[in-house]
Image: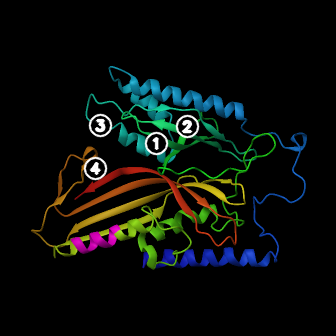
């Protein structure tokens, strides 16, 4: 019943978006955040940015530099971990807490960072934010482009709100910039793109659960983080069904963390958001087959087996591209970073 209710709300939201576009006439689709027609604004006519490129460059350099120093700290002190956590917020804080929750004496992974491409929106409301694309080199020497989003809540310092790694061989689309190099942030309800920023997360969640059979088929491109999850869930349900006493379920939902969106060249959007995946394995009768805690969750609980139920909660941070309205093309997942953040054993 809960799943059906969510599905009905999504269908209604999509119908409202379609109706809004239709009422705008046969010309360019209307929508908040859509750039005005006519001559571009000259630098003298542009409003002053709330966050300057210089400030963004300085704050990002300070954050990355501090992360490199703190991750190298030897011997490891509790204060080092506290300082690293204080530099994070929102979903990234949850992932950082897990990364630092290793065995005593272990250090977090040490990364080095390349030269960033800054994506700073000119017009925005508090809390202020900006994004950057920067190459991250891990301890094994693998280089992956990362999309970092920093945020500044009122009265607080800049912190890392979200981080995702682009899929191998993937690049972000060109972000639209004004004459001074500033990007355009899209409104939460922007309807000039195929999927508004607000709807991207719940539609992605539905695609991950229902796959090619769901009503989101064609709206979001098939891939490992969409239809791939649906295939995995279906296979796991069959596998656990062979054990007559075990039940399996896995559901996705949009998180309560911020959604960020920037206009791309051609009228599309680059959207950053996060999902929460909750997976449950339940023993229907006792005695039954063992329910083992998965390896990537062992650092979060003392137990290694669950007598009745095992529930894991995973935070997933994404970067997606959404095409312009009426383009006929699907949204695409291009970046991901996540992990299990909570485990419940009973």
Q: Is residue 167 above or below residue 268?
A: above
Residues packed near mark 2 inside 10 Å, few (<14), some (14 to 19) or many (20 plus) = many
Dot 3 lies on which element? loop
Residues packed near mark 1 inside 10 Å, few (<14), some (14 to 19) or many (20 plus) = some
Q: Is residue 88 magenta?
A: no
Label 3 to label 1, Cα distance in Å?
Answer: 15 Å
What predominant SS class does the magenta segment belong to? helix
Label 3 to label 2, Cα distance in Å?
Answer: 22 Å
Residue beneath label 2, please?
159
Task: Give the residues drawn in magenta, as a range.
Answer: 232-239
Label 4 to label 3, Cα distance in Å?
Answer: 11 Å
The residue drawn where x is 61% and y is 74% is 13
Residue beneath label 1, please?
93
Tell me: 293 left or right of 69: left
Q: Are marks 1 and 2 in contact (CB under 8 Å)?
A: yes
Dot 4 lies on which element? helix
Dot 2 lies on which element? strand
Q: Which mark is residue 297?
A: 4
Label 4 to label 1, Cα distance in Å?
Answer: 17 Å
Residue beneath label 3, please?
102
Q: Quadrant of residue 292?
A: bottom left
């Amino acid at each position: 019943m809960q799943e059906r209710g969510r599905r009905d709300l999504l269908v209604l939201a999509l119908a409202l978006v379609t109706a809004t576009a239709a009422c705008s006439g046969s010309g360019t689709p209307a929508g908040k955040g859509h750039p005005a027609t006519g001559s571009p604004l000259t630098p003298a006519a542009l409003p002053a940015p709330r966050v300057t490129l210089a400030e963004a460059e300085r704050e990002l350099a300070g954050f990355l530099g501090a992360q490199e120093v703190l991750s190298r700290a030897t011997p490891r002190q509790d204060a080092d971990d506290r300082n690293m956590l204080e530099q994070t917020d929102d979903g990234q804080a949850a992932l950082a807490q897990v990364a630092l929750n290793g065995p005593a004496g272990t250090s977090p992974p040490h990364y080095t960072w390349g030269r960033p491409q800054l994506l700073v929106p000119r017009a925005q409301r508090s809390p202020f934010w900006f994004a950057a694309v920067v190459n991250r080199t891990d301890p094994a020497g693998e280089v992956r482009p990362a999309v970092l989003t920093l945020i500044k809540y009122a009265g607080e310092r800049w912190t890392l709100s979200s981080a995702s790694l682009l899929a191998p061989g993937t690049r972000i689309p060109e972000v639209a910039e004004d004459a001074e190099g500033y990007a355009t942030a899209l409104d939460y309800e922007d309807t000039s793109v195929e999927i508004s920023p607000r709807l991207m997360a719940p539609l992605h969640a539905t695609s991950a659960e229902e796959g090619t059979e769901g009503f989101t088929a064609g709206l979001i491109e098939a891939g490992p983080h969409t239809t791939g999850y649906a295939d995995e869930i279906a296979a796991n349900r069959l596998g656990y069904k062979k054990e007559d006493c075990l039940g399996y379920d896995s559901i996705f939902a949009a998180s309560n963390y911020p959604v960020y969106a920037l206009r791309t060249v051609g009228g599309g959007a680059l959207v950053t958001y996060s999902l929460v995946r909750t997976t449950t394995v339940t023993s229907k009768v006792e005695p039954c087959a063992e329910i083992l805690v998965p390896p990537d969750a062992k650092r979060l609980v003392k137990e290694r087996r669950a007598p009745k139920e095992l529930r894991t909660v995973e935070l997933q941070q994404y970067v997606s591209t959404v095409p312009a309205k009426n383009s006929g093309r699907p949204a695409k997942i291009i970046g991901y970073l996540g992990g299990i953040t909570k485990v419940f054993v009973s």
